[in-house]
Image (cartoon, rainbow, N blue to C red):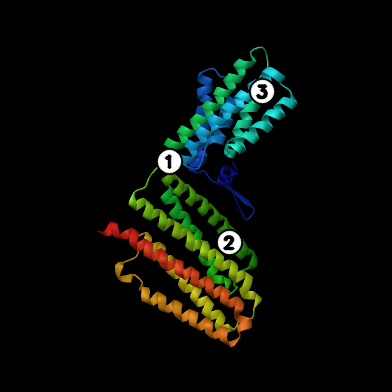
């Protein structure tokens, strides 16, 4: 639910920006259809169908199917326990509280925590039914919730099906742009603190979203048995794209923690700044290479890249031998830079392997 609200409202510099993505449109359509179906069959409690539809929309096809099966199990259990308590203990605040407590514990035991909100809605819907036709009302409300859940699943699968690959690559490029700006200015310290922090916060949030997105992407492939050779190679490549961004994030953290805590010579700052600039260019080059925007005659030589890295490391070692105690913090940063460059080289090899079958 929080992810849905985040996708609707974006707060930027104190202003609320409203955007409408596929998931928002699917949620609105699912609510509309579920309520319409209930009204078509004369079911008065259609509001519960709308609530169920809102809670059932998931960000991936696999999670949608899993949500449906989990919801049927937990809602049936919740309805059964609710009817049991209604028959033996009647409807009162204590019995409702007990059923809710029991069902939360059951959901956790079954490892179906995601279904807790809708299960509790089912319990409240059934146990709030009153009058002589209590069980008929309870059954109708249970069916209404199932209609809302099933409608959301159908809409989520067939309307605007998620395009994981395209979305992932777009988000990788957008996340890289912010990381690029941070790495290019972190040593020189030329950006205003508030601006730097704002971009850094956005970069870290986008990186977390990318990690979640990759999990969904990989989850979809594994659970639905899409094990073609090319898909496996593509998953490994996307994982490495994420890894280099994570290494960039670690590098930024190390610079913030160690670089300004020790005295740096002007020449030393230039060396670090130059190396970061070269690695960002290399990273940018690899993303362009993956998208097929680099001409063959302009492809970079691996020897030049290794030569640049060796030159940087030799220069850092020279400063370290001059003042070992003072340069310990800088060696941590240098190691992080080497890690980042290592994973960039690995990314290029994976891109070459991925693109090879396309050229043959």
User: What's the distance in space between the residues labelled 3 and 2, CA to CA?
Assistant: 49 Å
**Numbered disc 1: secondary structure:** loop
Q: Nearer the viewer, mark 3 or mark 2?
A: 3
Identify the residue under disc 3. Answer: 127
Is 296 left or right of 271, judged from the image as shown?
left
Query: As rendered, which of 109 and 281 lies closer to the eye?
Result: 109
- Evaluate if marks 3 and 1 touch, with contact meaning CB atoms under 8 Å apart: no
Quadrant placement of the C terminus: bottom left
Residue 209 to residue 196: above or below:
above
Locate residue 88: give its quadrant. Answer: top right
Q: Residues within 10 Å of mark 2 (few under 14, many from 20)?
A: some
Mark before the other along the chain sequence, 3 or 1: 3
Characterize the local packing of mark 3: few (<14), some (14-19) or many (20 or more) Cα atoms within 10 angstroms.
Answer: many
N-terminal of the pair, mark 1 or mark 2, is 1
Q: In which image quadrant can residue 78 be found?
A: top right
Q: CA–CA distance between discs 1 and 2?
A: 31 Å
Q: CA distance from mark 3 to mark 1?
A: 36 Å
Task: Report the mark closest to the observer, 3 or 1.
Answer: 3
Residue 312 vertical position relative to residue 352 in the rendered view, above or below: below
Q: Which callout, 3 or 2, points at the residue further toward the start of the chain?
A: 3
Residue 59 as seen in the image, left or right of residue 122: left
Task: Say what secondary structure mark 3 lies in.
Answer: helix
The residue pinned by badge 2 equals 199
Task: Give left or right: position of 304 versus 50.
Answer: left
Which residue lies under the disc numbered 1? Answer: 161
Q: Position of residue 312 (x, y in %)?
A: 48, 79
Residue 230: tell me if it is visible: yes
């Amino acid at each position: 639910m929080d992810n849905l609200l985040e996708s609707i409202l974006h707060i930027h510099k104190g202003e609320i920006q409203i955007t409408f993505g596929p998931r928002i449109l699917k949620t609105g359509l699912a609510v509309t259809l579920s309520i319409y179906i209930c009204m078509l069959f004369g079911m008065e409690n259609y509001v519960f169908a709308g609530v169920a539809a809102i809670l059932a929309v998931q960000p991936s096809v696999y999670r949608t199917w899993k949500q449906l099966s989990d919801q049927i199990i937990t809602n049936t259990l919740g309805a059964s326990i609710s009817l049991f308590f209604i028959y033996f203990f009647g409807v009162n605040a204590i019995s409702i509280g007990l059923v809710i407590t029991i069902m939360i514990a059951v959901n956790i035991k079954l490892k179906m925590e995601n279904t807790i909100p809708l299960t509790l809605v089912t319990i409240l819907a059934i146990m709030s039914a009153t009058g002589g036709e209590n069980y008929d009302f309870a059954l109708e409300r249970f069916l209404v919730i199932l209609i809302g859940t099933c409608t959301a699943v159908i809409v989520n699968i067939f309307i605007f099906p998620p395009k994981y690959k395209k979305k992932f690559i777009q988000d990788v490029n957008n996340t890289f742009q912010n990381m690029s700006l941070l790495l290019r200015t972190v040593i020189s310290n030329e950006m205003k603190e508030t601006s730097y922090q704002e971009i850094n916060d956005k970069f870290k949030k986008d990186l977390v979203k990318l990690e979640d997105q990759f999990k969904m992407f990989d989850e979809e492939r594994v659970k639905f048995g899409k094990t073609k050779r090319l898909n496996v190679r593509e998953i490994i490549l996307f994982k490495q794209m994420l890894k280099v961004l994570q290494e960039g994030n670690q590098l930024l953290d190390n610079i913030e923690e160690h670089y300004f805590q020790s005295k740096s010579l002007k020449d030393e700052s230039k060396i670090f700044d130059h190396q970061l600039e070269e690695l960002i260019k290399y990273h940018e080059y690899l993303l362009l290479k993956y998208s097929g925007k680099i001409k063959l005659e302009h492809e970079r030589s691996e020897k030049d890249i290794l030569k640049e890295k060796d030159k940087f490391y030799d220069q850092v070692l020279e400063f370290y031998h001059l003042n070992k105690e003072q340069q310990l913090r800088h060696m941590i940063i240098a190691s992080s830079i080497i890690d980042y460059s290592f994973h960039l080289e690995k990314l290029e090899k994976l891109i070459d392997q991925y693109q090879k079958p396309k050229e043959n």
